Image (cartoon, coloured by chain):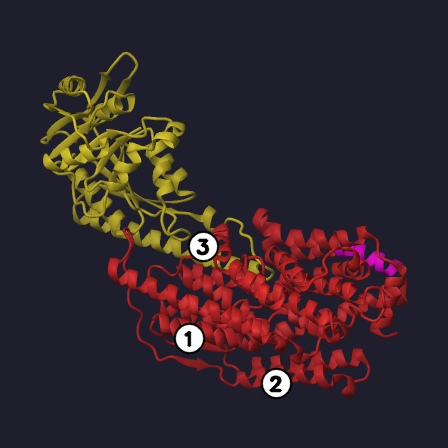
Chain colours: A red, B yellow
Amino acid sequence: MSSAEVASRAVQTGTPAWAVAPFVAYLLSIAALPLFLGHFWEKNRNKLIFALALSAPVIAFLLGRGATTGGAQLLRTGIDYVGFMALLGALFTITGNVCLSGSLPGTPAVNTALLAAGAVLGSVVGTTGASALLIRPLLRANEQRFKTTHLVVFFIFIVANGGGLLTPLGDPPLFLGFLRGVPFTWTLRLLPMWALENGVLLALFAVVDSVVVARERRTGPPRGSTPRPAPLPERFRLQGRLNLLWLLGVVAVVFVMGTYGARLFPDEHARAVAQIAGMSTFAALSWFFTSPDVRAKNRFTWAPMIEVAVVFLGVFVTMVPALSFLEERGASLGVTQPWQFFWASGALSSVLDNAPTYLTFASLATGVADAGAGVLSTADLGTLAAHPVGQHLLQAVSCGSVMMGAVTYIGNGPNFMVKAIADQHHARTPSFFGYIVWSGAILLPLFWVISRIFFH
Amino acid sequence: MFEARLDLSDSVLVRARMFKEILVCLEGSPSSDAALRTAMSIAALLPARLVGLAVVDEPDIRAGAAMGIGGAAFKHERDEALVADAHARAAEWLNAFERRCRDAKIAAYALEIVGRPADAILEETDKHDLTVLGRDANFRFETASDDSKTREAILHKATRPVLVVPETVHDIGTRVVIAFDGSRAARRALASFAGSGLATGREVYVATVDDNGARAWELAAEGVDLLKQQRIPATPHNIVSALSNTDALFTFAESSGAGLLVMGAFAHSRLQHLFHGSVTRGIVERTTIPLYLQH
């Protein structure tokens, strides 16, 4: 049975609203538990128990619908999950095996150039990889400066979020779309939005950084601050260069499987397995051909990947009925215009993780564009990407999910990673609400402009 | 041990004693260094024993934080790194403190406490005769760029006198101005200062700022009389000025060459501060000489 048939069968049987509750509860818990039960949430075992507890009723519900409907949906989401983790794991391994060492001068021009590089790199190695690669060189370059909060904030805006808009490798939401059938090159249609967002942010950053540097030179260090020793000069160099080859390998696997996969592997399960195997191979090559010293310099550990694997396990299972529900009822929920999709997907991506939010609104868009015709399916978002109305909705969802993941520290995985690394370097970072003030003042007006130009 | 019971009014009774043990709060900034210099000069003169306190703010470092998926591992790594760094810095400051005290032949011991800075310092403040802290000290150095909240909490809640020292100060000089407005806090400040031993060998001025010169003189003279009970000679000064109370006091302290300003801290309730602002806060922010504050 094909994915479209599975989805169609699910639509026919109807999804009760209560089946969406575990998904909603899970997403809210992911956002709230680290804050209120920090020590509990620190342990992956607790996260796994929590994920399984909320997944259990969903699994029971799906299996209750029969092996050919619910069971097939579970199998499909399982394959998506493994493919998703294989890509994240491959990019995590490869970027963790590359290290930019040495010192750069922390001038506005160099800082802007680093952020611009991150805006491009984000779409090649993913926003997490680009952030992990560039944040330490940026912090080292500005170690002697006292006002560095804006550096971290703009870094999160540009490198950890906006830069990942151009390819499915850039940000987990887009890769989820790719796994569900959105063509590899489709995201290049988002180039104008990417250019506008990152261009404006880079220009604004250059101005802000220049003003801060000029003010620091004029007024000297703030009262009560301790002078910081100058870092020892060290040649700026890239270690683990061979990994660029393995990275190209991953890009090639994703591109080839997305573009020619159906011809090479007519069976979709075999196609998924080939893709996972390809990515895992390049991750393994990266691991074995890189000196452990490079990983040590990057303080590489598997802990973040294990956490992502555990948490996303719950996301993938609990979202199955939610996506079916939205596909079935999408047209009746009142969200029909691209600008509404942009703001709605963005608003939820700001406070929940943006990957499941993307799929939720892509499913809603499927329901709206299909309008009961039974042509489009959440199991194959490629049909939505090719649909005359649906493609605009999907563009809006893609932009909203990726761009507005930057609005809070919760919105996108690398946001907090950047903050944590900056804290370790004693670069001052805003509090949770302080960060929202920054993003509210800078990003929201920019999103309004993007919405007016592209989605009205 | 010198100990005196001062009957300052019908309602204010203060048991003042000569300072024997002085707590100095360390956090590695130039402000904290000024606090240590000043504390050492006082301890050498009295003489008194110095207790160097460094606080490792582990609760705030490890506090829960909102984060995206995958953030917990980075949070854990960050927390461990910051806690280790805080312990290392505390050890470094305390070692330097002990070394300096040993070189200056001042009796001293070092103390490291893990906890919220305001709570930890307040607990120790209760056990010592005087607490010395840098005006711009940042006890939450791992998680915040400034920390006026800890200072305010200490000044609001400390039951013993606190000496707040700005960055450029080395000692408390030879002239002292006691700002006396007749309030309970001002009487307590005067009494504890009188018993501390810090007045010995110093010129003491009791100054009262008021629009009514006669009333100001009367209050200042009352303050002088109270000091006389402790055999401390002092001169009264009434200040009538178009400037604000804070500016008038600073101008007088500067013109008299004072190296120490003694006053009651936060004489009004927090609600009153909300509506009228706080003279204490303004003085603490702007002072260029050490402030001896008693709540």
Residue B284 in view of the camera: yes
A102 sits to left or right of B8: right
Q: Which amino acid type is shown beneath numbered disc 3?
A: Pro
Q: Is A170 part of what is drawn in magenta?
A: no
User: Disc 1 is attached to a residue of which chain?
Assistant: A
Q: Secondary structure at mark 1?
A: helix
Q: CA distance from mark 2 to mark 1?
A: 27 Å
User: Disc 2 is attached to a residue of which chain?
Assistant: A
Q: CA distance from mark 2 to mark 3?
A: 38 Å
Residue B178 in picture, x, y percent from top left: 18, 28
| Number of residues whose C-alpha sits closer than 10 Å to that of mark 2, classed few (under 14), some (14–19) or many (20 or more) | some
The quarter of the picture where the N terminus of chain A appears is bottom right
Q: For mark 1, what is the residue?
A: A113
Q: Secondary structure at mark 2?
A: helix
Q: For mark 2, what is the residue?
A: A249
Residue placed farthest to the top in the image? Answer: B10
Secondary structure predominantly adopted by residues drawn in magenta = helix
Q: Which amino acid type is shown beneath numbered disc 2?
A: Gly
B229 lies above or below A197 = above
Q: Are marks 2 and 3 on the same chain?
A: yes
Q: Which residues are magenta?
A: A55-64
Residue A306 in picture, x, y percent from top left: 62, 65
Q: Nearer the viewer, mark 2 or mark 3?
A: 3
Q: Which amino acid type is shown beneath numbered disc 1?
A: Ala
Indicate which disc residue A430 carries: 3
Q: Earlier in the sequence, mark 3 or mark 1?
A: 1
Indicate which disc residue A422 carries: none
